[in-house]
Amino acid sequence: MSLQHILLGIIAEPKSGYDIKQEFDSSLKHFWFAELSQIYPALKKLVADDLARVEGVPSDKGPDKKLYSRTDAGTQALIDWLHTGPATSPVRHGFLGQVFFMGTQKDREAALKFFKELKAHYQARYAALQAVEAGWKAQCPTYPDGLGDDDFFMQMTLDAGLRFQRSYMDWCTNSIDRIKSRYHD
C-alpha cells in the first residue's frame, strides 16, 4: 500500500492539504499515518503523473487555497491498485521489540507498569473507535449492513480497528496476569 494510493482514495472530491490531513487524523489513523511533510510531496507527484489535478481557489486568509482532486487516470490507478490483491507489508511494533528484551531489566514492577500503560493506550484508541461507531449507528438504523457502498467498506476498516484494539487489550491483560503469576503476586 502506498501513500499515493491512499491519497487517490481521499481526493475523490476536491480537498486541500489541510482537509486531507484531517481525514488521516479522523478516519484513517487506525491503519495509516501521514504527516503534511509526506502528503504534499505525494500530491505533487500525483499531479505530475496526471493522476490528480490541483486548482487554486481564492482564500480570504492569504494565498490561494490549493484543492486537489483525482483525474480519470487517477481513478483508474486506484481501481488497478484495488485489483492487485491485498497489500500486506511487514509490521513494525516498537513495543513488541521492548517486550522481546524486557527480561534484561529484571524489574517486575517496571514490566507491569509497561503493560498497564500499553493497555490504557489501546483502551483509549478502542474508545475513540467506539465513538465513531456510535455516530454511524445513530445515523443508520440498519447499521452496519444498511450503510451505503462507500461507508459499508469503510466500516469494515473500523471493525478491523476495533478487533485489533480488543486483541491488544486482551493480550495486555493476559501479560499482566502472567507476570503477576510468575512472580507470585
Image: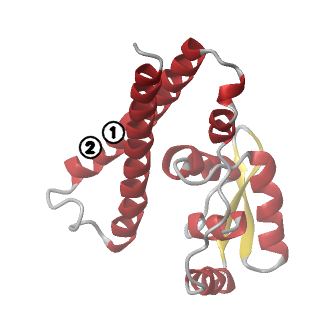
Q: Which kind of residue does numbered mark 2 sit on?
A: Ala
Q: Is residue 139 left or right of residue 172?
A: left
**Residue appearing at x 51%, y 19% in the figure:** 112
Determine the image quadrant of residue 22. Answer: top right
Q: Is residue 156 left or right of residue 10?
A: left
Image position, residue 28 (x, y; %) = 53, 52
Closer to the camera in the image, 155 or 18: 155
Image position, residue 105 (x, y; %) = 70, 20
Query: Considering only vertical position in the picture, is 1 above or below 99?
Result: below
For disc 1, the neighbor class at 10 Å (few under 14, some 14 to 19, many from 20) is few
The residue labelled by disc 2 is 134
Q: Which kind of residue does numbered mark 1 sit on?
A: Ala
**Residue appearing at x 56%, y 87% in the figure:** 83
Image position, residue 165 (x, y; %) = 43, 43
**Residue appearing at x 62%, y 65% in the figure:** 6
**Picture disc at residue 1:** none
Q: Farthest left residue?
A: 141
Determine the image quadrant of residue 80. Answer: bottom right
Closer to the camera in the image, 38 or 17: 38
For disc 2, the neighbor class at 10 Å (few under 14, some 14 to 19, many from 20) is few
**Residue appearing at x 62%, y 15% in the figure:** 107
Image position, residue 128 (x, y; %) = 40, 37
| Residue 123 seen in render | no
Disc 1 to disc 2, C-alpha distance: 5 Å
Please, what secondary structure does the residue beneath circle 1 have? helix
Q: Quadrant of the N terminus?
A: bottom right
**Picture disc at residue 131:** 1
Closer to the camera in the image, 109 or 57: 109
Closer to the camera in the image, 125 or 74: 125
